[in-house]
Amino acid sequence: MTVAGTPSAVTPWWRDRRWIPWIVQGAVALAVLVVVAFLLGNLVRNLTAAGLLLSWRWLGNPAGFDISETLLPYDASLPYWRALLAGLANTLRVVAAGLVGATVLGTLVGTASFSSNGLLRRLARIYVELIRNIPLLLQLVFWYFVVFLSLPNGEQAIQLPGLVLAKSGLYLGQTQLVDGVWQGSLKFTVEFGALLTGLVVYTGAFIAEVVRGGVAAVPPGQWEAARSLGFSPFQTLQRIVLPQALRVIVPGLNSQYISLAKNSSLAVACGYTDLYSVAETTLNQTGRAVEVVLILLGAYLVIDLLISALMNGVNRL
């Protein structure tokens, strides 16, 4: 008991609640640094023993392998960094196209869940439940081997105005058959088509649930008010419900977009030459496992961070 007029006892620093959080955080940070230093030291010792100290000079050596399709000019005589860049361009191409396709498909299916047509609602639910519960890898194998590689060639190919879908690829624009081989203004390989279709169909199912949840979060009174003003269901959805639902939808879309970018690394199942495929070939030829893995980690991390930054910017609007 403190006597009046005498100074109160001083609290020891190790019992002062102002210092305890800082002490705990400092101890945890020190432990993490020790573990990281141990792991790095162990890595350096093992690489030194194997004669594989970190080096990036091999990036300038001729790659010596071809890439079946790429947006960038490339041949086997070019260095490894050009091969990795060509693979990155292929990855970005399928990711960009996949984001657009999955968004459109997911939005259509998600809004179809609120359709007055009972059959359309049931079909939307069947699609979502079926696709979400089948592994993406199996779906990619299905699209590539069962669907796209089973397409006919030559005159038996699927022909539409400005579009030809054959086993040799997808042809757009002015198409013509020359000596049994289709030619067009723009061509996509079946490997790209299978990967893109698989990513769009799979991610679209998850985006449909995100859209459905966002639309369901809009108060029912908004629908009723729109009907009282004479709006059609489509006009209500387009002008009133979706703009309000975006606040709920956008954060969920961010996660699905990032997942699509990461899932694109399964392109090897379709034989599509993306960044992961090129990196795997590079690793087998050079033996530079650490450097190649660091390149892969950095590339996918940057892609995902860019998607996240873009979606966070949209969310702030």
Image (cartoon, rainbow, N blue to C red):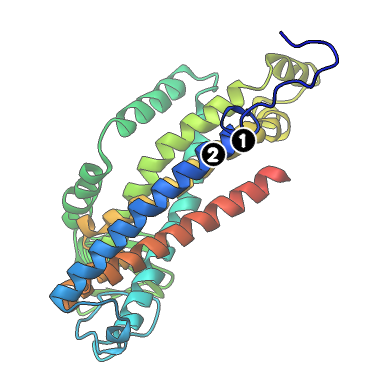
- Foreground pick, 38 / 2: 2
> Helix, strand, or loop for circle 1?
loop
Residue 277 can be seen in this image? no
Whole-percent x and y of residue 181? 22, 75
Whole-percent x and y of residue 172? 40, 67
Give the residue pinned by disc 2. 23
Quadrant location of residue 8? top right
Residue at image position (69%, 17%) is 219
Q: Is residue 308 rendered to the left or right of residue 60?
A: right
Give the residue pinned by disc 1. 19
- Foreground pick, 280 / 175: 280
Quadrant location of residue 38? bottom left
Q: Residues within 10 Å of mark 1 (few under 14, many from 20)?
A: few
The kind of residue on which mark 2 rests is Ile
Whole-percent x and y of residue 92? 43, 64
Picture layout, residue 181 above or below residue 240: below
Residue at image position (35%, 55%) is 36
Q: CA distance from mark 1 to mark 2?
A: 6 Å
Assign the C terminus to one quadrant of the image. top right
The kind of residue on which mark 1 rests is Trp
